[in-house]
Every structure is written in C-alpha cells, then in structure tokens.
Amino acid sequence: MAVKISISALFFFCLLLRSSATPRRHIRAHHPCKKMVFYFHDIIYNGKNSKNATAAIVGAPAWGNKTILATQNHFGNLVVFDDPITLDNNLHSTPVGRAQGFYIYDKKDVFTAWLGFSFVFNSTEHKGSINFAGADPLMNKTRDISVTGGTGDFFMARGVATLMTDSFEGEVYFRLRVDIKLYECW
Ligand SMILES: *[C@@H]1O[C@H](CO)[C@@H](O)[C@H](O)[C@H]1NC(C)=O
Ligand SMILES: *[C@@H]1O[C@H](CO)[C@@H](O)[C@H](O)[C@H]1NC(C)=O
Ligand SMILES: *[C@@H]1O[C@H](CO)[C@@H](O)[C@H](O)[C@H]1NC(C)=O
Ligand SMILES: *[C@@H]1O[C@H](CO)[C@@H](O)[C@H](O)[C@H]1NC(C)=O
C-alpha cells in the first residue's frame, strides 16, 4: 500500500515538474489583453435589393419562403451573410474586412438567433481572422457570444464579444456593434 502511494505521489510530482517546465508563451488573465470595437452591416435580400444585399435567406420552414423572413419570430430561417466590417457606424466607410457566416432563428416565441461567423480582415491594420459562435437573444440590449479562436494577427485568440444592435431599419438593414475582449493573446 505504502509503495503504491509513493509511486502515485512520484507520478504527480513528475506531472507538476513537467507542467511548470512547460514554457507559457501566451498571456491568460482576468483582464482583457486586447480590446477592439467594430461594426458590421447586414442587408438582407428582400426580392428587390439584389444589388446591395449582403445576406440571403437560404433556409425557411415549410410555412415560409426564402424572400421574406418567416412568421413566428422567423423560427426556422437560416441566413448566410458576407457583410462589410467598419471601424465606425457608417455603412459607407471603407471596410476593414468582412463578417462571413450564418445565423439561424431558433425560438418560436421570441426573437432569438444562433450565430456562427468569422471576421476576415484584410487591412493594413489587421490580417487574419477571428471566429465567433453563440446564442444571440435579440431582444436583449447586449448579448455575449464566444470568441472561439483566430488566425494570423489573432492566432489562438479567445474571449468574449458583446453584441449590440446599433440600428435596425425596415426589416432589411441592421447594424451590429461588436465589442471584442480577448482574454488570451499570443
Ligand atoms: C440598397 O439599395 C436600394 C436600391 O438602390 C436602396 O433603396 C436602399 O436604401 C439600399 N439599402 C441600404 C441599406 O443602403
Ligand atoms: C413569401 O411570403 C410572403 C409572406 O407570407 C408573401 O407575401 C410573398 O408573396 C411570398 N413570396 C414568394 C416568392 O412566395
Ligand atoms: C487583400 O487586399 C489586397 C490589397 O488590396 C489584395 O491584393 C488581396 O487580394 C486581398 N486578399 C484577400 C484575401 O481579399
Ligand atoms: C438577457 O437579458 C436578461 C434580462 O436583462 C438577462 O437576465 C440575461 O442574462 C440576458 N441574456 C444574455 C445571454 O445576455
């Protein structure tokens, strides 16, 4: 018994040694290591705006169609987007990248979506991508989603993004403000 205990103690001691010897190249903290604010602009195709639409309904429930978001809080709609990202709230500012991905409306009795998308940057300021995923209860003033990773300038990024609907116009255009706080930076 005593031998067994000392062997396992030795094992854990070795584990401890190993982990303390592993170099920690990244910073992990309870305070953000990087903060950024962006806006992205979504113009949903509505049958008439194919020239400037940046999003398309690609899935609809049997009671709807792909031109108009469905009744019952759009439950069952799947929208794919390729939206410009800007540093301020002006749709016509020079974009710094594209927000690309999808949202699905996933609750019948209240506006709620699930988001999966990436910010793909191609500007002198930022190169690379940031990946986002999470629930978006649209009726909340602010909603937190996860920053699940990144590439390039945002290699291994992890954190939280706070979304705020900055503008919503005529069922077609909306603008989201995205406050990104990274808690892991390499
Ligand atoms: C998109 O284009 C249409 C037609 O040119 C225009 O009426 C509409 O305001 C534009 N939408 C946005 C959000 O700029
Ligand atoms: C789509 O559904 C809307 C609302 O029910 C309806 O007004 C519209 O005519 C439909 N469009 C097509 C192309 O079926
Ligand atoms: C990024 O921007 C540069 C310069 O404008 C352009 O040449 C290049 O094709 C762009 N790359 C992507 C992936 O959009
Ligand atoms: C949405 O708002 C409600 C009430 O303000 C709050 O209790 C809830 O935690 C919020 N949900 C999210 C996901 O932010």
Image (spheres, rainbow, N blue to C red):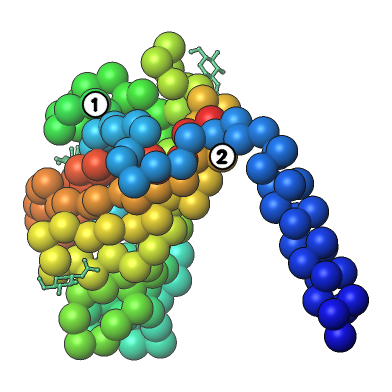
Q: Which mark is residue 54?
A: none
Circle number at residue 156: 2
User: Do we see residue 83 in this rendering?
Assistant: no
Q: Residue at x 45, y 64 (%)?
A: 58
Task: Give me the residue at 36% from left, 24% from top.
Answer: 96
| Residue that numbered label 1 is attached to | 87
Mark 2 element type: loop
**Where in the figure is residue 71, as x and y percent of width and height?**
22, 82
Position above or below: 171 against 95 = below
User: Is the residue 25 above or below the residue 14 in the image?
Assistant: above
Q: Nearer the viewer, mark 2 or mark 1?
A: 2
Question: Could you say where residue 61 lies in the image, as x and y percent from the top left?
Answer: 39, 83
- Amino acid type shown at disc 2: Met
As rendered, which of 48 and 126 lies closer to the eye?
126
Would residue 14 be found to the left or right of residue 108 on screen?
A: right
Q: Which of the 4 image quarters holds residue 171? A: bottom left
Disc 2 to disc 1, how far (Cα)? Answer: 23 Å
